[in-house]
Image: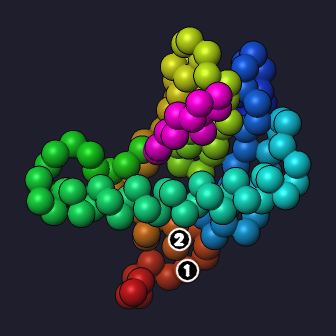
Amino acid sequence: MHIVKQLMAIPGVIAAGEYAYRGDRFSFQGALTDEFARMASILCRANTLSVNMQSEIFDSFAENCGCRPVQGWIVHGANVTVCTVGNYFAFIENREELLNDVMTIMRAKVGDIHEDLLANLYAKLGGDTKEALY
């Protein structure tokens, strides 16, 4: 079963989907409008890059601190939590144990994210990862 369908089968999951690493394409299921899902995919991409940049900075001061490679991120709001692993996202209600259930499925289905995020993102776009990325 596809990860998004598995996530949507869990009571309390508002929406789940997949976003493109470029931020311009997405697919989702759940209670989001197309425009909100588009903005969510852009937000997920931007936050993923930001979290990776911050972990690289932190790692430069505290080598082997265990925060690299980044596996995803979670933002816990007053009523809703947003979580991502790889290029999958889920909007969930803030209910006891729901986050653990969602993250267990996401981590099991997506697997480990490798060290060089920019090279991985660039390769998914069809780029030549041997050339300079900057």
Badge 2 marks a residue whose secondary structure is helix
Q: Are marks 1 and 2 in contact (CB under 8 Å)?
A: yes
Image quadrant holding the C terminus, namely bottom left
Q: Residue furthest top?
A: 96
Q: Position of residue 105 (x, y in %)?
A: 58, 26
Residue 127 circle label: 1
Residue 31 appears left or right of 122? right
Report which quarter residue 93 is drawn in. Answer: top right
Residue pointed to by mark 2: 123
Q: Is residue 116 above or below residue 98?
A: below
The stretch of residues the image draws in magenta is 72-82
Residue 109 appears left or right of 64? right
Q: Residue at 73% of width from left, 44% of height from top?
A: 17
Is 113 magenta? The answer is no
- Camera sees residue 23: yes
Which sits in the foreground, 47 or 21?
Answer: 47
Q: Position of residue 89 (x, y in %)?
A: 64, 43
Q: Main secondary structure of the magenta part?
A: strand
